[in-house]
Structure formats: C-alpha cells, structure tokens
Amino acid sequence: GQQVMQIPQYQHVQEGEDFTTYCNSSTTLSNIQWYKQRPGGHPVFLIQLVKSGEVKKQKRLTFQFGEAKKNSSLHITATQTTDVGTYFCAGRANSGYALNFGKGTSLLVTP
Amino acid sequence: ETGVTQTPRHLVMGMTNKKSLKCEQHLGHNAMYWYKQSAKKPLELMFVYSLEERVENNSVPSRFSPECPNSSHLFLHLHTLQPEDSALYLCASSQGGQFAPQHFGDGTRLSIL
C-alpha cells in the first residue's frame, strides 16, 4: 500500500537557522497536506498543495510539491522558538481511500 | 478552542472495562474521523464517516466500535482493550469529504492497565 516517508525524524537547530523537512511517497499523490503539532497539542492544518510543482508561502514557511507529485518539502527560514513542534505531511494516492500521514519531523529550536 | 471537542481528555481503564470516547464538532462539517496516535508511528486512521457513509480501516480490531448518530457527534466504544491500545485517540472533522483539510480535537489520552 501507499506509504508516506518523512525525513529527518528529528531536527535540533539554533534560533535563526533554517529548517527543512522532506516528504516522499511510493506512489503519485493527488494532493499533499501539512500539519503542525505542538508538544502536548493536536495536529493543526497548515496548507494543502494540489498542483504539480506548486509552491506556496506562509510568512517564513515555504511549501513545495514535486513535479512528479511524489514528494514535498516544508522549509522554515530563520526559525523561532515558536516553531517548535512536529510537522506532518499527509497525502492521498490517486486511488486511495484515505489520507496517509508520515511519521513527522520533530523540530526543536533553542534560543 | 478548536471547534472539535473530545471527552474525556484522559482515561485509564482495565482490560475488562467498557468505555466510550465522545467527539463533537461545532464547525458544520460533513465528515468525521477517529485516529490513533502512538509514539514513533504515523497517525493511523481508524474510522471515517463521510456523508453518512462509514469507511473503515480493515486492520482495526473489533474491540473498537464507532458510532455516528449525526453529522456533529462521533463516539468510539471500547471493550476488552489490550495494553498496546494505549495511545492518544484523536477525533477530526472536515468539510467536503475525507480528503479535505482536517480539524482535530485535543484528543483522549488512553491508558490500559
């Protein structure tokens, strides 16, 4: 079945450094969503990408969807302590019946 | 306030107990979900109710039984659970079907003794 893999599993950065997490699928995705979960909290929807090669920005966050629609990335510029949390991607295969979540990348930002 | 309310927030139960988790969404959405979140594992979709039709993950054991009396309420009935069922159980809702952006509740932290 479809799997969504995320790397890295953990990332520890100094405040002000950049951060990137990558999401890869074994099959072509019809869309990809990104969520953020703060420690002790619940996943919060950030964005959805649908088109091949699509790039969207939210302030310091840049989201990309690969040309083949099998991979995606989230890049944070100049991290802040408020960026701490786990970032999940979730994708649906073209023939899938549900979203498949990656295991997430846990980001720790130290001042 | 997320718009999706789950009760209880924490639950400790023995393996022979029967309990239910409750979820209510105030967003007017037409799909609701149960997810299981365990350490070091991806979010696992357990059940979906979308447009009043139930879709489920066939790997979910029968000791978990969902109920969706209307589009705003969702229950997860639990009986004779196992220690490996200890996890955070998240309810979510969405508008426009099961592939639309999902709004999660705060979850129920379940511990099986």
Image (cartoon, coloured by chain):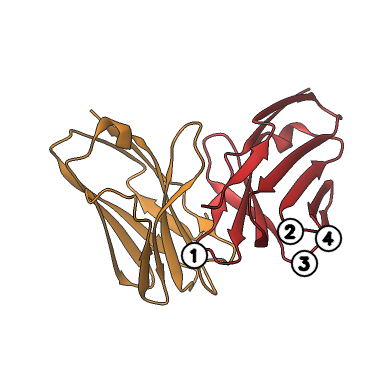
Chain colours: A red, B orange
Spatial CA distance of label 3 from label 4 is 6 Å
What is the number of the mark on residue A53?
A: 4
Label 2 lies in what chain? A
Mark positioned earlier in the residue sequence (3 or 1): 3
Can you tell which quarter of the image residue A8 is in? top right
Amino acid at pointer 1: Tyr
Single out the mark in the foreground, 2 or 3: 2
Dot 3 and dot 4 within a common chain: yes
Q: Kindly indicate whether the residues beneath marks 2 and 1 are on one polypeptide chain.
A: yes
Dot 3: within a 10 Å radius of its alpha carbon, few (fewer than 14), some, or many (20 or more) residues?
Answer: some
Distance, label 1 to label 4, CA atoms, is: 24 Å
Q: Quadrant of the C terminus of chain A?
A: top right
Q: Mark 1, residues whose alpha carbon is within 10 Å: few (<14), some, or many (≥20)?
A: some
| Residue at left offset 76%, top offset 45% | A74
Label 2 element class = loop
**Chain letter, disc 1 residue:** A
**Precedes in sequence: disc 2 or disc 1:** 2
Q: Which residue is mark 2?
A: A69
**Cα gap from disc 2 to disc 1, whole angstroms:** 17 Å
Give the class, few, some or many, for how many residues have Cα within 10 Å of label 4's Cα (few <14, many ≥20): some
Do the numbered discs 2 and 3 sit on residues whose CB atoms are within 8 Å?
no
- Examine the rendered structure and indicate whether residue B85 appears above or below residue B6: above
Task: Name the residue carrying label 1.
Answer: A97
Q: Residue flagged by tag 4: what amino acid is it?
A: Gly
Q: CA distance from mark 3 to mark 1?
A: 19 Å
Q: Amino acid at mark 2?
A: Lys
Question: Does residue B40 appear to the left or right of A109 in the view shown?
Answer: left
Callout 4: helix, strand or loop?
A: loop
* Same subunit, tags 2 and 3: yes
Subunit bearing disc 3: A
Q: Please give the name of the residue rendered at 61% of the width and 52% of the height, measured from the top-left corner.
A: A90
Respond whether the residues carrying marks 2 and 4 are from the same subunit: yes
